[in-house]
Image: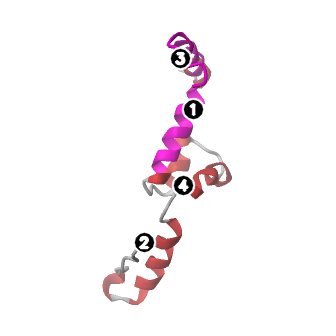
Amino acid sequence: MRYEDVSHTFDRAATKAGFDDVTFHTLRHTFASRMAQRGIPLKAIQELLGHGTMQMTMRYAHLSPNNLRDAVAALEGAGSPRGMARKIAP
């Protein structure tokens, strides 16, 4: 089934249900936003959404609350036994 077919069918159903401001793209955007908010790596989001470039996926980066903190924590733990990173308090 093609994306256009699913999108068109969804749009008709949403309109019929009274959701005039909801589109199939709204679902994709919400899906990506929720993944970013839960700390899913941007590379995984890119692959799941089928984005050809990371630039497309980067629009969700600001929703990832710990991405910079986790990166620093990984570097801090690089010299510790077994490479375990310490958790940084929020």
State whether the magenta stretch is mostly helix, strand or loop.
helix
Say which residue label 4 marks: 63
The three-letter amino acid code for the residue at tag 3 is Ala
**Residue 63's image quarter?**
bottom right
Say which residue label 3 marks: 14
Say which residue label 2 marks: 90
Characterize the local packing of mark 2: few (<14), some (14-19) or many (20 or more) Cα atoms within 10 angstroms.
Answer: few
> Disc 1 to disc 4, how far (Cα)?
16 Å
Q: Name the element at disc 3.
A: helix
Q: Nearer the viewer, residue 63 or 2?
A: 63
The three-letter amino acid code for the residue at tag 1 is Thr
> Disc 4 to disc 3, how far (Cα)?
27 Å
Say which residue label 1 marks: 26
* Label 1 vs 4, first from the N-terminus: 1
- What residue do we see at 41% from left, 89% from top? 79
Residue 49 as seen in the image, left or right of residue 54: left
In the rendered image, residue 30 lying in the magenta stretch gets the answer yes
Characterize the local packing of mark 1: few (<14), some (14-19) or many (20 or more) Cα atoms within 10 angstroms.
Answer: few
Q: Nearer the viewer, residue 76 or 18?
A: 18
The three-letter amino acid code for the residue at tag 4 is Leu
The three-letter amino acid code for the residue at tag 2 is Pro
Q: Are marks 2 and 4 in contact (CB under 8 Å)?
A: no
* Label 2 vs 3, first from the N-terminus: 3
**Residue most extreme to the left:** 81
Q: Name the element at disc 4.
A: helix
- What residue do we see at 36% from left, 82% from top? 83
> Disc 1 to disc 3, how far (Cα)?
11 Å
Q: Nearer the viewer, residue 89 or 23?
A: 89
Residues drawn in magenta: 7-35
